[in-house]
Amino acid sequence: MDSKKIMNEFPTLNIIHHPLLEDKIARMRDKSTPPDEFRRLLKEIAALMTYETCRHFETTERSVESPLEKTSVQILKRNIAVVPVLRAGLGMIDGVLSIIPEARIGMLGLYRNEETLQPVDYYLNLPQNLDKMDVILVDPMLATGGSAKAAATTLKNYGVKRLTMMALIVAPEGVRVMQEAHPDVAIYTAVMDRQLNEKGYILPGLGDAGDRCFGT
Ligand code: PRP
Ligand code: URA
């Protein structure tokens, strides 16, 4: 699909094009890439994507004194919180923190029931005052969209007002589900793949991100 068509059909989607991302994703797709390299690549990709994912965050004016004179500067308007979806989202957290070391971190545990593909939640631990922060939901894979939709709903129920999603690879089916349920949530990705298979896996994808990350 050309980029104009993608923009029309998927208004909440932002695809980050960069040769470094393409090269690293190529290595992650390769089934012979072992877990240690897979984890390193995921972390590096998360760092690169974070820079672009925060592009729309608001800043506010402050004044500082440089060694030479007082000047007005722009600083981030809000604290940032990052919420990885366990397990695979954990593989992205160090990359995000290498760019935003001061970010607060929440944890959201979800897995897909392998038969129904419906998300099952098993853990939630979030920082307080998320309503005042810019929150980034982090998960490498957006497939049917069930997990992302449930995660975004949970975060909004918890008070989150400004939510952005960062996903390494998305499927068109999942983006549609997300933009229908959460049209206010911008999604940043490195690539939109072709489709899902009958088991809800992204094609061509990279397989099960959690399993490949943690060697299970
Ligand atoms: C993967 C992935 C997402 C979800 C995406 O997690 O990390 O959370 O699948 O699929 P969906 O869009 O169809 O919901 P998984 O359920 O495999 O859990 P895991 O990370 O613990 O392996
Ligand atoms: N979850 C994954 O880890 N990979 C897929 O392709 C789909 C869902």
Image (cartoon, rainbow, N blue to C red):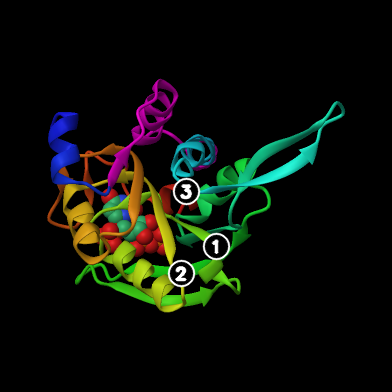
**Which x, y percent locates residue 174?**
22, 55
Ligand 1 falls in quadrant: bottom left
Nearest to viewer (mark 1 / mark 3)? 1
- Residue carrying label 2: 160
Question: Is residue 29 located in the magenta-colored stretch of the structure?
Answer: yes
Q: CA distance from mark 1 to mark 3?
A: 29 Å
Q: Are marks 1 and 2 in contact (CB under 8 Å)?
A: yes
Q: Are marks 3 and 2 in contact (CB under 8 Å)?
A: no
Say which amino acid is labelled 2. Answer: Val
Front-lying residue, 59 or 106 = 59
Helix, strand or loop under label 2: loop
Categorize mark 2 by other alpha carbons within 10 Å: few (<14), some (14-19), many (20+).
Answer: some
Inspect this view and state whether residue 31 appears.
Answer: no
**Which x, y percent locates residue 181?**
23, 66
Report the span colored magenta: 13-41
**Which x, y percent locates residue 132?**
55, 67
Q: Magenta-highlighted stretch: main secondary structure? A: helix
Picture quarter with the N terminus: top left
- Residue carrying label 1: 133
Going by the image, does 151 lie left or right of 10? right
Say which amino acid is labelled 3. Answer: Cys
Front-lying residue, 7 or 153 = 7
Image quarter for residue 118?
Answer: bottom left
Precedes in sequence: disc 3 or disc 2: 2
Q: CA distance from mark 1 to mark 2?
A: 8 Å
Residue at the right extreme, as displayed: 67
Going by the image, does 71 lie left or right of 169? right
Say which amino acid is labelled 1. Answer: Met
Q: CA distance from mark 3 to mark 2?
A: 29 Å
